[in-house]
Image (cartoon, rainbow, N blue to C red):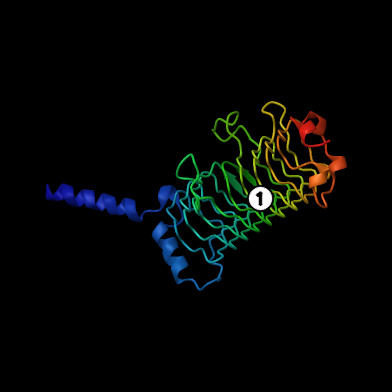
Amino acid sequence: MIKIFWLAALAYAVIEIAPALGADATAREIASLLFKAAPNSHPALADKDLRRLDLAGLDFKRANLSKSNLFGADLSGANLSGTNLSGAMLDRVTLIGARLDGANLDHASMLRPSTFTRLTPLPGEAPSLKSASLKGAKFFGSFMGSNFSGADLTDSDCAPTHTTGFIEYIWRTDLTGADLTAATLTRADMTQTKLSFAVLKNAVLRDTILREADLSGANLAGADLSGADLTGADLSDADVTGANLEAANLHDTKGLDTLKGLALARNSEKVIR
């Protein structure tokens, strides 16, 4: 009996300290590294395999995590502000309450992250990506109420890929109520994206793709587009019910005369007269 007890205890200890599924370090080692690092010292974690590690609540101190594999990692409540996550794998990470303000997420992949503890989002749970750079990034999931103000999403792609193992014909990237004030979405592919009641004041949507023939396209119902640059944006089959697109209600809005597919947008006659 005693032998069995010690064998069980040893097995538990091995599981507890061993890197998760071949990761380059344990969660404890990463936490120790970050704790000992001086503020803003940019701890070196580039090209690391950090899959499925529990890194919740950690302050990454503007670490260099470029091209690291964080698949399935728990980053709940983590401070990733100012970190370099360019080219990183962030698919299926947990981002509840995480801060990525000013982070570099250029060409990163962030498919199906867990961002809320329940179907109805709670205040404070949405991840913050204020002023983050997501140029060329691929992301797909729920970011309801998230702060993307001042973020650069040039050439980003949040349209379904049909390769994530998800029922993408039913679900789509959800930016309902998100703050995209002054965000840059030039040439971003937002096909099927839900933008109901999103704030897009002064946002740059030059040549942004907001269309989808089959599922009624990006939902802009109730979105605030005052002051936005809509030059060349494609609204084919988008739902613009209640969107603030009427020229009389827009101040310094650019590109209304260059919008593509507006005649094909649902309920466009109610907002453009």
SS class, disc 1: loop
Please tell me which residue lies in front, 44 or 164: 164
* Residue at image coords 57%, 57%: 100
Please tell me which residue lies in front, 83 or 178: 178
Q: Is residue 101 above or below residue 269?
A: below
How many marks overall?
A: 1
Q: Residues within 10 Å of mark 1 (few under 14, many from 20)?
A: many
* Residue at image coords 53%, 61%: 45
Task: Answer whether residue 225 is visible to the viewer in this image.
Answer: yes
Q: Whole-percent x and y of residue 63?
A: 55, 64
Q: Amino acid at mark 1?
A: His
Q: Quadrant of residue 82?
A: bottom right
Q: Which residue is mark 1?
A: 107
* Residue at image coords 29%, 54%: 13
Q: Whole-percent x and y of residue 244?
A: 74, 43
Which part of the image, by quadrant, shows the C terminus? top right
